[in-house]
Amino acid sequence: MITDLSSDVIKGVGIGLRSAHYQDILNYKPTVPWFEVLSDNYLSPGGMPLYYLERIRQDYPVNLHGVGMSLGSTDPLNLDYLLRLKRLAQRIEPAYISDHLAWISVNGCYLNDLMPLPYTKEVIEHLARRILQVQEFLGRQILLENPSLYLTFTESTMPEWEFIQELLEKADCYLLLDLNNVYVSATNQGFDPFDYLNALPANRVKEIHLAGYEEREDYLFDTHGYPVHNPVWKLYQKALERFGTVPTLIEWDTDIPDFEVLMVEASKAQQQLAKVELRIGN
Ligand SMILES: [Fe+2]
């Protein structure tokens, strides 16, 4: 029995929960509609991270966002990892569970990075089979995040948006649309990010990520260590118009600033979201 996610359970602009902010959040209970955590940091059934997460969960909805499913790998699914994730989900009761369109393991060796996939029918079949197994095991549908890419495979037979569209249908799962990633890939590969948004299936976009990239000499690098850049805010506007008021996360993973800085980013996103909400309401 799989719980489907057809109705929305979170709204507004959430913030990525980082350990540097645990105590402030407990002390001051900021007005944030929901938080998202990196689930891989909470898989041990004890310890301080889980202690804080459970306390924060008493006041806020939480999403579990992970990197460990390695859905694109040819290794067997890691049942130990999935079992620990399932137990965490039973404790936390997250709104969404998500992972990435990527692979991170080969012959049982785990890499520290999310690795890209060639976009072919064969890879769609492979991923869809594994996603369906994961959803069966967890008893719920999951969200998959689009990658930020620095290279393409000559083996690919379709653009990323077509690959994602077909995969979401086959695996009956949802998209976590990272707009920073779309912009980074579009710049590095030379496609139009607005064409990308126009091609995605609106009914499958369940969450949006906003983050900041780093400008390198001749490419963009996805660091999640900066405020959201202007071109990504423009994409956000377009995404809200096309997909509606999708729950949105401010994601910041390196050089983590004071919580107030994240609140400022979140309120910028909330203003854009509220304008679209008003227009839809009218
Ligand atoms: Fe993201």
Image (cartoon, rainbow, N blue to C red):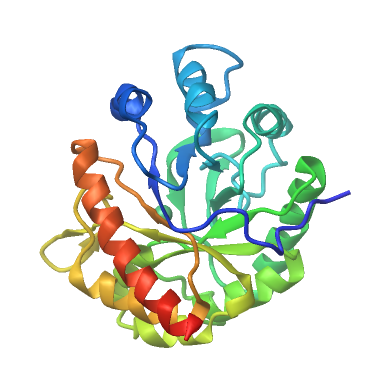
Q: Relative to 127, does residue 82 appear above or below in the rendering?
A: above
Q: Is residue 109 left or right of residue 150?
A: right
Q: Is residue 97 left or right of residue 1?
A: left
Q: Nearer the viewer, residue 107 or 112?
A: 112
- Percent position of residue 209, x then y: 41, 59
Q: Nearer the viewer, residue 172 or 167?
A: 172
- Percent position of residue 237, x then y: 34, 78
Q: Confirm whether residue 211 shows in the render.
A: yes
Ligand 1 lies in quarter: bottom left
Q: Quadrant of residue 61?
A: top right
Q: Is residue 60 left or right of residue 29?
A: right
Instruction: Identify the residue at the far top of this view.
Output: 47
- Percent position of residue 86, x then y: 71, 33
Residue drawn at 35 percent across, 76 percent down: 275
Instruction: Identify the residue at the far right of this view.
Output: 1
Instruction: Identify the residue at the far left of this view.
Output: 217
- Percent position of residue 138, x then y: 76, 41
Residue drawn at 26 percent across, 47 percent down: 263
Residue drawn at 23 percent across, 60 percent down: 228
Q: Is residue 40 left or right of residue 130?
A: left
Residue drawn at 19 percent across, 38 percent down: 257
Q: Quadrant of residue 77?
A: top right
Q: Confirm whether residue 149 shows in the render.
A: no
Q: Nearer the viewer, residue 190 or 208?
A: 208
**How many numbered marks have been drawn onto this rendered protein structure?**
0
